[in-house]
Image (tube, helix red, strand yellow):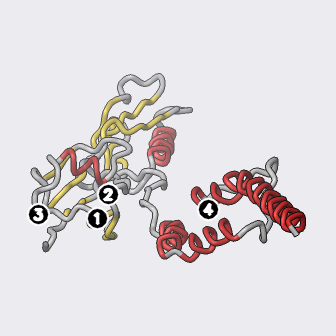
Amino acid sequence: MRGVHAQIASLMAALVLAGCMQTGSELAMAPRSDLDAMAYGQPSYSSYPTASADSGGAISAVRANFTASPRNAYAAATPAAYAAAPMAAAHDAPYRLDAGDKLRVVVFGQEGLTNTYAIDAGGAITMPLIGAVAARGKTPAGLAADISARLRNGYIREPSVAVEVESYRPFFILGEVAAPGQYPYVPNMSVESAVAIAGGFSPRAKRDSVTLTHNAGRTVVPLGTSISPGDTVLVGERWF
């Protein structure tokens, strides 16, 4: 009888040992395939074996709890929410000239015509020989083509003209900033840098968005939005 009990005990010990070895092997592989993927959202590496679906209750339970967690559901929904949010507007269209811009007009071989010209309130520049040339709403290249055409009409046989913006018309910032007013425009400005130039927000300023007026259109935009010459930034007041 004692021998039978010894054999049964030995058999049970062997089964327990085999079960522990198998479970230990699968758990050793889990950090690569299951836990890293669940914790960091990264796919498992194909060079490492992955635990099977029925490899043990512990990992399956962790996976089920992680997937069902409200926090995990929020994290999964967050990228979609950001993707749906409007991106900061960038004015990528060709720059259009207007009153207040100062232009450097170069007519090659003609020192008397090469000079800096300011666009007046009427939207034109005035040059020797050809007089007033409309500039408002045109690109620098378009204005150069118009000047060339005017010079070619009885003044210069084959004029070569280049136009570049020497200084841009100012932008305006109003509302809840330390020093509202008119400021020189600097290329690649954003709403945030405009607020910094105006001395920063006032204590009562609404700091997450502003109202931007661009080409007669008014939009509520975030602080990272690009602005253009002539734009008006209005910083609102928060109510609490």
* Residue that carries the numbered disc 2 in the rendered image: 223
Contact between labelled residues 3 and 4, with CB atoms less than 8 Å apart: no
Of tags 3 and 2, the one toward the viewer is: 3
* Residue that carries the numbered disc 1 in the rendered image: 209
- For marks 4 and 3, the one nearer the N-term is 4
Secondary-structure class at tag 4: helix
Q: Nearer the viewer, residue 140 or 155?
A: 140
Check disc 2 and give the amino acid type.
Leu
Contact between labelled residues 1 and 2, with CB atoms less than 8 Å apart: yes
Check disc 4 and give the amino acid type.
Met
Picture disc at residue 204: 3
Secondary-structure class at tag 2: loop
Give the quadrant of the N terminus: bottom right
Check disc 3 and give the amino acid type.
Arg
Give the quadrant of the C terminus: bottom left
Whole-Å distance between the Cαs marked 4 and 2? Answer: 34 Å
Whole-Å distance between the Cαs marked 3 and 2? Answer: 16 Å
Crowd tier of the residue under label 3, counting other residues whose Cα lies within 10 Å: few below 14, some 14–19, many 20 or above: few
Percent across and percent down for residue 161 are 48, 34
